[in-house]
Image: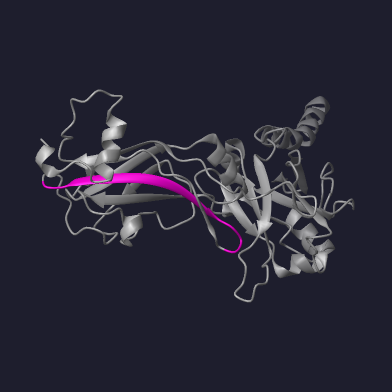
Amino acid sequence: MKKLCLFVMCLMLILPGLTYADEASDYPSSLEKPAGISVRLGARSEHGEDLPFIIRMTQPNSIMKLAKEDNVFFELDWKTNDGSWKFNKSWDKKNDESLWDYYDRVFGVFYVCGYVGNIIHDERNSFDFNLVNEWLKEIGTYDLDNNTYYYRFRYVLEIDDGNGYSHVVSPWSDTASIGKLSEGKIPSSLEAPKNLKAELKEDQNGKPYFHFTCEIPKSIEDVNKQIPVRNFIDWKVGDDKWASESGAGVLNKGDYILYDNINIDPVDEGRWFEVDIKQNTYYFRMYFETRKPDQTPIRSPFSNIVEIGTPEFYSGASAWATPELNKAVEYGLIPEILKG
């Protein structure tokens, strides 16, 4: 009987630890490094003043998946010139307070960290984080001509077992900089979209819409990690002028997100009241655009031209001649009498 009681007591002491061990095993033992970070000035105000810095962060797929289920924080850090990093805390020991409470108690700030899963990301897992005025007060009056400001971030997975908080921490991201020694410059040009394709589809109510796909060059993917890049689709009907030339308005999704798969409803866009591919031929071309802090646009060349509607009158032409014939159509060099 004594042996049985002793055995039960041992189980009572061991089982909680086993339970926690099982729960802990459900969490990863390491986190992937952030995919990218950049820093830039915000839009310039009407008075010519530079608004606060904007940090752009890009996450790997593993972090986005984990953040849907667990408390994954991003933790931002910065320094000026050769100074020390400001928020370089070690999370290697169990704590009685959460990461969120720690920053509130020690620094009185919440803007150092945030939940990855609570933030709206674009399709490539990037989001912009505006450095609020409280943060800039920490820096003081920033001087981009004489100082360089460095930024980095990492992920912290917080595990609450009811007896305290433990953490799994990722490596720091690469360093982004802005100022005198900054290498992160906004590009002066963009590469054009590749292999634009278009087709006319119908929704469940029989309402037509255009479906576009394109290939996004790696150079554009890289720029998008630094600053948002947007797709625009230029269009025309038959021999009319292109929308970008006539002022009719190019097509876009209404947000600064980079897409390789786009649906456009021309009726909802207010461009055409009726899509009639039996009577009309529709032409499309795409370009990328980003903007400098003063809102000056940087635009790529146009992509290839795609056509929907009346079958091509030169459908029997050799493949090498088709691009030149497309250009001839674009410039109105082929009269109607020769078509068909």
> Residue 140's spot in the image, x, y percent?
82, 68
- Residue appearing at x 75%, y 44% in the figure: 175
Q: Relative to 1, say whether 20 is above or below.
A: below
Is 113 magenta? The answer is: no
> Residue 19's spot in the image, x, y percent?
70, 35
Q: Which image quarter: residue 169? A: top right
Nearest the eye: 45 or 297: 297
Q: Is any atom of residue 7 visible in this view?
A: yes
Boundaries of the magenta span: 279-294
Q: Which image quarter: residue 156? A: top right
Q: Is residue 295 left or right of residue 26?
A: left
Task: Examine the residues drawn in magenta and state their main secondary structure.
Answer: strand
Is 287 magenta? The answer is: yes
Quick one: quadrant of the N terminus?
top right
Nearest the eye: 296 or 107: 296
Quick one: quadrant of the C terminus?
top left
Q: Relative to 225, say whether 98 is above or below.
A: below
> Residue 102's spot in the image, x, y percent?
80, 58
- Residue appearing at x 79%, y 36% in the figure: 13
